[in-house]
Structure formats: C-alpha cells, structure tokens
Amino acid sequence: MSTHIAAASGEIAETVLLPGDPLRAEWIARTYLDDATCYSRVRNMLGFTGRYRGVPVSVQGTGMGQPSLSIYVHELLAEYGARTLVRVGSCGSMQPHVGIRDVVIGLSAATDSAENVLRFEGFHYAPTADFQLVRAVVERAEAAGTRHHVGQLFSTDSFYHDRPELRDRLRDFGVLAVEMEAAALYTLAAKFGARALAVCTVSDHLITGDETSSDERERTFGDMVELALDAVTG
C-alpha cells in the first residue's frame, strides 16, 4: 500500500489506463472490464482492476495536471510494478486541421512545467512516448477509420493561460494540441524503464472556439478508450 493508492500487492495490473477524472476511471472499468473491482478510494481518486478480453488491466484516476499525475504514476511505477501506462483524456486543438472529436496520439510533449527544469538542472529533456505503443494505437485507428493525428502535445501547468501568444508560437512550430499531463507521464516512464503514451480526444478548438457537448465527449471518449485497450492487450 502506497501513500496515495490503497492497493495491496498484486491488486494492480502491469497495464494501466490513466484518465484524469476518477469518475471516468469508474466508467471505463464498469463499461469495458470484466470482473472489475475497486482497489483504492483514497481521496476519492478511484482505481480499478479487471480483465479486457482476458488480459488484466487497471484504470487509475490521476487528477488534473502534472503534479497530481506525477504522484499516482510514480507510485504505480515504483511500488506496484506498472509497466505500460496510457493516458486517456481530452485536449484542445491548436491546429486548423485537427478537428473536434479527432484523436491526437502524443509522440512527444513540450511543457511549461518547471518539473524537468529542476530534475535536469537546466538541461532540456525531451519527453517522448513509447514507439511500439504509438504504432499499435495508430494501426488500430487506421483499421477503425478513426480520424487521428500523431505529433507533439503541449503539457501546460496553466489551464487559464496569461500568455496566449506563447501558445500561438507553439502552434506555429507544429504542436497539435494542448493538455496537462503527458510530459510528466513520459518522463517518469523513462525513469523507471516503462512504456507510456497519451491518447487524447479533441474536446475543444482553440482557434475556432468550437467545443463538444458532454454527451459527445462521452461517446468519443469511448472510441478512444477502445483504441487504447485494443492496443495494449492485442
């Protein structure tokens, strides 16, 4: 049992999906996993383990932002032996060609967080996804006919940004979408020799102002979760 996850040894699978919202974790577990059981309710950050097509899979809520995700991912890797971690969440499109409800597969992640500045003492580390996971999700997205894009995410620490011109500069350099977790996930996975990927559904568009309704988010979120589950268990 770790500080923030109240699971006993062996209760968490080596493969873990990571939605930010703990209620999404519960929804994924109840919708897609057989024999799902809850292993943690600490701070209401729910975690579940079950089976998807016979393969053990856990789903752990992480909260919003890199500091929160880092707590849960560190404990999953350091104390529970997780080896494959896939973030499933939403993102905001930063490019005209990346539309609402499209799936963005994060090959790498830029960030304005100070976590890696402190960790690497001024060196600029490049947080990068696991290539095999990227390829597996892309292949399944192609087979399903799902509109998807592969490229760089921007993991920001500020949901309400005071410097939108900096975000625009990232867009000019090809960053596809903004979210709040991938850079920390990729860094910690690398530290522990594990695999990680962020797969995000576009819920709103920073250029056009378009956004999805709550019902649309739930439907498209399900499509993304199925892609991730098929990739990590196939």
Image (cartoon, rainbow, N blue to C red):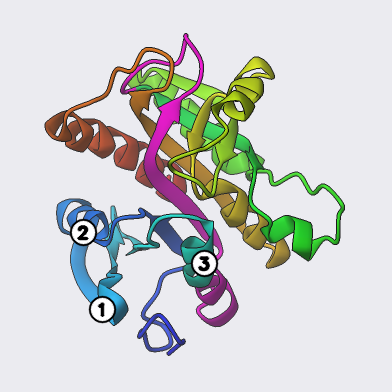
Residue type marked 2: Leu
Compute the Cα span from label 3 to label 1: 16 Å
With 48 as the anchor, is 131 left or right in this view?
Answer: right
Q: Is disc 3 in contact with disc 1, using a CB cutoff of under 8 Å?
A: no
With 37 as the anchor, is 164 left or right in this view?
Answer: right
Q: Is disc 2 in contact with disc 1, using a CB cutoff of under 8 Å?
A: no
**In the rendered structure, which segment of residues is drawn in magenta?**
74-101
Q: Quadrant of residue 41?
A: bottom left
Q: Earlier in the sequence, mark 2 or mark 1?
A: 2
Q: Which residue is mark 3?
A: 73
Please say whether residue 28 is visible from this viewpoint: yes
Q: Which mark is residue 41?
A: 1
Question: Extreme top residue here?
Answer: 97
Question: Extreme left residue here?
Answer: 215
Q: Which residue is mark 2?
A: 23
In front of the other: 184 or 165: 165
Residue positioned 79% across, 49% down in the render? 125
